[in-house]
Image (cartoon, rainbow, N blue to C red):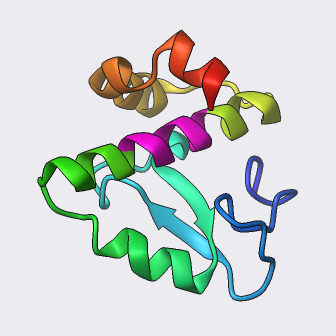
Amino acid sequence: EEVWGDFPYCALCGYNQNCSIHHIDSTTSNSIYNSIILCHAHHMIADTHNTQSPLSKDYRKNLRKIAYNRVVKSGHINNKKDETYLDKHRTNITELDVQGA
């Protein structure tokens, strides 16, 4: 709610019907950075990228950047699980990536 409650739109297309939270890296972490709001169509596509293929890794990397920007804009204060998640994915969320997202 803190982050996504005021942003009820698909982070990829802006559609605001049938949106739900998608875990970017499956349910390996409950960090807010591991979540993104997607419409039903984009959620279905994102679910197909829960593999280790290079294409899927790039797809999830893009979702992480979008989620990171949204979380930072919300003013969210990181907790331990957020820091752990960011440490694991730090190379995928660089300052340059964030500015260009």
Instruction: Write the residue at 49% across / 76% down.
Output: 43
Q: Is residue 56 magenta?
A: no
Q: Residue 79's quadrant in the figure?
A: top right
Against 62, residue 39 (above or below) is below
The rendered magenta stretch, by its main secondary structure, is classed as helix
From this view, report whether residue 28 is shown above or below residue 87: below
Which residue appears farthest toward the right when viewing the image?
Answer: 6
Nearer to us in this view, 52 or 8: 52
Residue 40 coordinates in the image, percent (x, y)? 57, 85
Is residue 67 in the magenta section?
Answer: yes
Number of disc labels: 0
57 sits to left or right of 96: left
Q: Which residues are magenta?
A: 61-68
Closer to us: 29 or 59: 59
**Percent position of residue 69, x then y:** 67, 33
29 or 67: nearer the eye? 67
- Work out whether 78 lies above or below 6: above
Instruction: Point out residue 97 in the picture as x, y percentages from the top left corner.
Output: 52, 22
Q: From the viewer's perspective, is 82 left or right of 85?
A: right
For the N terminus, give its image quadrant: bottom right
* Quarter the C terminus occupies: top right
Q: Is residue 15 above or below residue 63?
A: below
Which residue lies at the image location 32% right of the left edge and 52% below the top edge?
25
Quick one: which residue is furthest to the left in this view? Answer: 52
Residue closest to the eye, 14 or 25: 14
Residue at 63 percent across and 64 percent down: it is: 37
Q: State the residue lying farthest toward the top.
A: 95
Spot occupied by residue 19 in the image (x, y as percentages of width and height): 67, 79
